[in-house]
Image (spheres, helix red, strand yellow):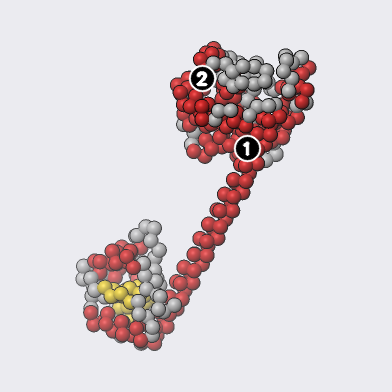
């Protein structure tokens, strides 16, 4: 401990500094730095980051109280304990030094062994505190790493669940990539913060998770669905909402909202609840326009891909009917970037 402890002694009297150096060196404290010009205290302190400061009070330019004010005002710099060593014996000076942050106060002339004990005790306490802080930092980093691993695992499961639903009806996993990145782009253009943008990116892949509960005869039918079959198909929104409910994390709440409401329409003609306008959660409105555009412009076993221009015209004509007009405007304004997403994640 003694060999590695960094001690900074500040005193305008070179004789006093030499005395401290001989005393401390004799007990193994060799990493001692002497400073006679108190005006340099901040610069020297930040360079050394000492474990202990031995500080005189009566000095020109900056006295010991000024030095403490300067050092304690430093931000983002750990503060070392201070032992004031002063010829001032009055209780007022002692109290003032302690109030300003000094940990101990020794009067001159001091008893050598007493000072050495005070130095040792403060160094031991300070180094123990540093060790605890280091251990706490290590534990915090371990917790953060573990939390990230759990978060990444959860996202992986979420994405695979979304892909499982897509594969059931012969859509490709790239549909959920395109759709989720279009959702992300629209959310960004709406001015969402980074946290919420990441939420919709990771929640939207589960929009069709409820298709897991739709019979194959309905889900994979190439021809037009009967009225009864269409009701079974529409049930996937409600099924998806039920599958994802019960987890109150932000991610799963948003995923549930998207699964449940991405087939609602701005004019109230959608399903399953017939929600109208802003009754539909914003994440559901965003997912609706992203899902429809990608579905229209993608090949499916039962249809050809629409040309992008026709799909865009459909989106425009559905403003205020199927889609939120504000989102349609954002969609049109950013269509080039949206089509870049389409090209990036081609089937």
Task: Find residue 89 and report its horizontal and vertical position in percent.
Answer: 31, 80
Separation of disc 1 and disc 2 at Cα?
27 Å
Residue at 63% in and 29% down: 172
Residue 220 visible in image: yes
Q: Quadrant of the C terminus?
A: top right
What residue do we see at 57% from left, 20% from top? 297
Q: Is residue 198 above or below residue 215?
A: below
Task: Give the class, few, some or many, for how many residues have Cα within 10 Å of label 1's Cα (few <14, many ≥20).
Answer: some
Looking at the picture, does residue 176 appear above or below residue 225?
below
Instruction: Say which of 270 and 234 sits in front.
Output: 234
Q: Which residue is mark 1?
A: 159
Disc 1, SS:
helix
Q: Which residue is mark 2?
A: 328
Query: In which image quadrant can residue 71 be found?
Result: bottom left
For label 2, the crowd category at 10 Å Cα-Cα, with few meaning under 14, some 14 to 19 and many 20 or more, is many
Label 2 SS: helix
Task: Count the labels in the image.
Answer: 2
Q: Residue 27: name its quadrant.
A: bottom left
Residue 330 in the image, given as x and y percentages of width and height: 48, 23
Question: Percent x, y for residue 295?
Answer: 60, 22
Residue 79 is situated, as x and y percent measured from the top left of the image, at 39, 65
Image quadrant occupied by the N terminus? bottom left
Q: Is residue 67 above or below residue 20?
A: above
- Between 296 and 69, the residue placed more toward the observer is 296
């Amino acid at each position: 401990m003694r060999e590695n402890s960094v001690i900074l002694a500040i005193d305008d009297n070179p004789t006093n500094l030499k005395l401290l150096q001989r005393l401390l060196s004799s007990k193994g404290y060799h990493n001692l730095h002497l400073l006679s010009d108190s005006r340099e205290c901040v610069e020297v302190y930040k360079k050394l980051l000492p474990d202990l400061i031995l500080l005189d009070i009566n000095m020109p330019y900056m006295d010991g109280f000024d030095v403490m004010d300067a050092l304690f005002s430093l931000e983002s710099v750990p503060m070392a304990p201070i032992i004031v060593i002063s010829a001032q014996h009055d209780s007022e000076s002692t109290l003032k030094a302690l109030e300003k942050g000094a940990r101990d106060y020794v009067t001159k002339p001091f008893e050598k062994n007493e000072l050495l004990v005070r130095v040792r005790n403060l160094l031991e306490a300070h180094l123990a505190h540093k060790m605890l802080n280091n251990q706490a930092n290590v534990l915090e980093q371990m917790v953060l790493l573990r939390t990230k691993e759990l978060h990444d695992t959860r996202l992986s499961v979420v994405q695979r669940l979304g892909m499982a639903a897509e594969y059931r009806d012969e859509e490709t996993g790239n549909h959920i990539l395109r759709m989720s990145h279009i959702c992300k782009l629209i959310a960004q253009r709406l001015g969402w913060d980074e946290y919420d943008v990441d939420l919709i990116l990771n929640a939207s892949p589960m929009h069709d998770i409820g298709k897991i509960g739709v019979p194959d005869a309905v889900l994979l039918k190439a021809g037009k669905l009967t009225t009864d079959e269409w009701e079974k198909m529409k049930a996937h929104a409600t099924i998806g909402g039920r599958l994802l409910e019960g987890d109150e994390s932000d991610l799963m709440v948003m995923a549930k909202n998207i699964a449940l409401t991405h087939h609602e329409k701005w004019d109230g003609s959608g399903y399953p609840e017939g929600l109208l306008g802003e009754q539909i959660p914003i994440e559901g409105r965003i997912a609706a326009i992203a899902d429809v555009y990608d579905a229209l412009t993608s090949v499916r076993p039962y249809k050809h891909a629409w040309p992008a221009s026709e799909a865009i015209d459909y989106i425009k004509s559905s403003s205020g009917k199927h889609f939120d007009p504000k989102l349609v405007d954002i969609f049109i304004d950013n269509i080039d970037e949206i089509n870049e997403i389409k090209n990036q994640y081609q089937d």
